[in-house]
Structure formats: structure tokens, C-alpha cells
Image (cartoon, rainbow, N blue to C red):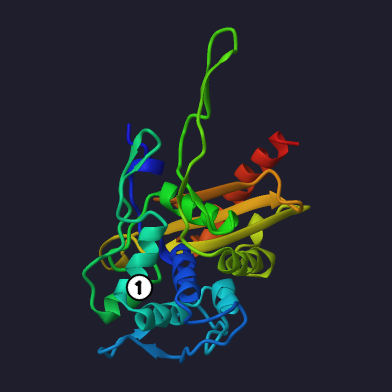
Amino acid sequence: MLNRALRDTYPPGSTFKVVTAAAALENGLYNGADQKTDSPLPYTLPNTRTELKNEGNIPCKNATMRVALQYSCNTVFGKIGADLGKEKMLAQAKKFGFNEEQFTPVRASASNFPEKMDKPQTALSSIGQFETATTPLQMAMVASAVANDGTLMKPYMVDKLQAPSLDVLSQTDPQEMSKPLSEKNAQILQSMMETVVKQGTGTNAQISGVTVGGKTGTAQHGLNNSENPYAWFISYAKLSDGSSPVAVAVVVEDENANRDDISGGGLAAPIARSVMKAVIDSKK
């Protein structure tokens, strides 16, 4: 049986914009959530005549990164990726764990951020298209690193082993894996992801009395996007005092719903909400 959370990779779609936003902050392209970006509308992919499209009539022209994440502006994050260039985007993705196998200790497939791209392909990769592909585990790691003030912890499946007497035989010691972004930039990104849930595409993940941050994604599937898309939602939740933290990645595939009804906010966010609420309730 295929462990889809660890072994299968999917195009992440707009959930990858969290990585692109982190790259913009870490490289000083933009210095905050509410600084206007240089984002024309329409936006033509570099060296082409192809216009990058947004979904619907959303306010993306020169939008701040907060607004761009809130409404999931392809034009803003595609241009950010092109402006940063493939080397900086690749470096940021690798800091989050892309392009390396993970061991939990069960082996997880390596998520892929392309290493050989031209500028248009870099723009597309930066919004989770082209050849970008990731496991659900990897995107949960992205959400958790943001929630954990920029520190990415090594993933593991077993917390402890107990004898029949319930004596603890061994206990997993949490280990820091990397520091994908500074504490300051992580907190900026937290505020952006929390706006997505408060008043953006992720409102279906709201939990009363709980701080929730997230990002939706609706990723292309099949040749020329001929099949039903994947619905994604990555998120974290914690109580107001920061306790009981949990990070989640949900991907819904091969959904039999009408194509126009498939979205990360509509299908995946409610599932993430249920999981996060169950975890937080169990710790009360």
C-alpha cells in the first residue's frame, strides 16, 4: 500500500507561495507584509508573450504580499520568483527540505523544486507549477517552520516506545533540522497566513478561540490540466498563548465533484480544520 503522505508527490499549486514569500523576505526583495510589490497586471512571463492569469477579478496589481497571499495572486508571486531568480528560489526551497529524502524513520520521497529552469519556468515554479512536486509531509514541514518562528524540526513518526508495563523504553528527542527563515520574517509570514484564514481564501479553516494560519492551493492535474485539479490546504493552529501547536497539510485528489467546485478552500480547508481542532481539543 502506498503511503501517500510520505511517498507520493503532487504539484503543490498556490501552497508553494508560502515558500516564495519566505524567499522574498529572506532576500530583502520586500521588507514586510504590507509593502506594495512591483506587480503589473497583466503580467507577461519573461521573454514570452504568455500572460500569467489570476483566478477571477481579484486585486493583484501592485498588491502587498499580505493581499497577494490572501487572494492568491499568481501574478505577484510569479514575478517575485522571476525577480529573485532560480538560484535564490532553489536555495530557499532546499532550506525547507526540498530535493532531499526525509526519514521519519520511514523513508519519505524527496520533494522536487527544479534545478534547471529558464526565467519563465522559474516564475511558474514559484507558484507551484511547472515541475514543482511535493509530498504532503513536505508542505506540512513548510507550515510548521513558519509557525515555529522559522525553525524547521526533523520530522518523526514515533514519539516513544513503551513496555507492556507502560515503562518508557525510548523517547524521541526532537531535533532542529534547519532555519529556513529568521524569527522576524517567520512572524511576518504568520501574520500573512493568518489573514488568509481570517478574511481570505482559507476562512473554512477558522476555529473559534484558536489562532489559525493557512494557505490554499488548487493544483493543475493531467496533461494540459485536463483532469480534476488537486485541492490543497497547508496550515497551523495554536491557542492564543502559543500552546498546543499543530501543523497540517491536506491534499484531496481525484475528487468526483464538479471541476468548478474543486478548491483548496472549499474541500481541503475543512478537513484541515477538523484535524487541527481534534489535536487541540485532545490537549486541553
| Amino acid type at mark 1 | Lys
Residue 267 visible in rendering:
no
Q: Secondary structure at mark 1?
A: helix
- Residue 51 occupies which quadrant of the picture? bottom left
**What residue sits 35% from the left and 56% below the top?**
98
Return the residue at label 1: 88
Quadrant where the N terminus sits is: top left
Residue closest to the eye, 203 or 118? 118
Compared with residue 71, is residue 3 higher up or lower down, i.e. above or below? above
- Total count of labels: 1
- In this view, which residue lies farthest toward the top? 165
Compared with residue 106, is residue 146 higher up or lower down, i.e. above or below? below
Give residue 199's position: percent from left, percent from top: 68, 69
Give residue 80's position: percent from left, percent from top: 42, 80
Give residue 60's position: percent from left, percent from top: 53, 84
Say left or right for 112 vs 173: left
Say left or right for 134 vs 195: left
Say left or right for 78 vs 131: right
Residue 159 visible in rendering:
yes
Give residue 148's position: percent from left, percent from top: 58, 54
Quadrant where the C terminus sits is: top right
**What residue sits 30% from the left and 86% below the top?**
50
